[in-house]
Amino acid sequence: MENYWKTFWTEHARSTISGHPQHQVLRTLNKKPISEAQFQRILKDIEEKVEICHNDEVLDLCCGNGLITKYLASKCKRVIGVDFAQELVTQIDLEKYQNISVVTEDIRKVDFKEHSFDKVIIYAGLQHFSYKETVYLFDSVICWLKSNGLFYIGDIPDREMLWNFFNTDERERAYFDSIKNDRPIIGTWFESEWLVKLGRNTGFKDIKILQQPENFPYSHYRFDMVLKKSQ
């Protein structure tokens, strides 16, 4: 799975480097980039759920071309973005956004000092992790967070809503072909209860599953999650 997604995103980034920024990170609907109005609603929703503050130090995992990273940077003290796709992260203007730092690395391998961040976010990235990798990710994040820190996971594919996405005969065939050929279309689909139990066993508190607003482009098959670290 790890090598598959590395190859997929490396090739996709190279083929779309001069294209629409939303298409570069596959934030599309019916194969077209979502509108700026839709994206602004998503950004505001993230800001509210993350409870972003001006003095926060934030870690943005799977940051891609930095569309979310740059918005967070305008609201907080510092953001570190992590992604392995060099062609995507180079889209972030580090001279313009001087409180952003970029680490070009696979987040399965990156490491940070304990208690480094007030907030850690991963948006539309958890699907690229296996269940085992997700367990290790939670272990890492709770270590990196400061006391009372917050872990926000956005745009998680909902296992119970899988057929809301694969909702035509053609899509069903594509789904089963993807399994047969070991070429996942979305990636890992998660049950919310599985993630809640993982969070509790990792040591998080105040775990909340959050439904996306109905007018969001992917609300019919995705959900968000917030977990807090105890003191």
Image (cartoon, rainbow, N blue to C red):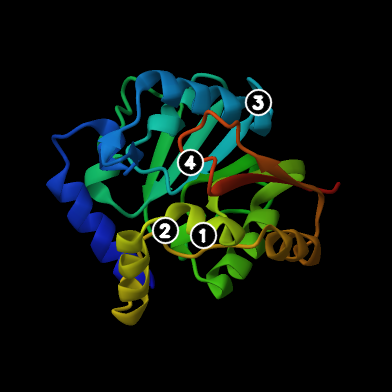
Q: Position of residue 160 (x, y in %)?
A: 61, 60
Gap between marks 4 and 2 measured at Cα? 13 Å
Please state which amino acid type lies under the numbered disc 1: Leu
Residue contact between numbered discs 2 and 1, judged by CB atoms under 8 Å = yes
| Residue in the picture at 36% in, 20% down | 36
| Residue in the picture at 31% in, 34% down | 22
Instruction: Give the mark nearer the N terminus: 4 vs 2.
Output: 2
Residue for badge 3: 48
Residue for badge 1: 162
Q: Nearer the viewer, residue 11 or 91?
A: 11
Instruction: Give the mark nearer the N terminus: 4 vs 3.
Output: 3
Gap between marks 4 and 3 measured at Cα? 18 Å
Gap between marks 3 and 1 measured at Cα? 27 Å
Residue for badge 4: 218
Residue contact between numbered discs 4 and 1, judged by CB atoms under 8 Å = no
Q: Tag 1, which secondary structure?
A: helix
Instruction: Give the mark nearer the N terminus: 3 vs 2.
Output: 3
Instruction: Give the mark nearer the N terminus: 3 vs 1.
Output: 3
Please state which amino acid type lies under the numbered disc 3: Glu
Please state which amino acid type lies under the numbered disc 2: Phe
User: Hey, which quadrant is residue 32 in on the image?
Assistant: top left
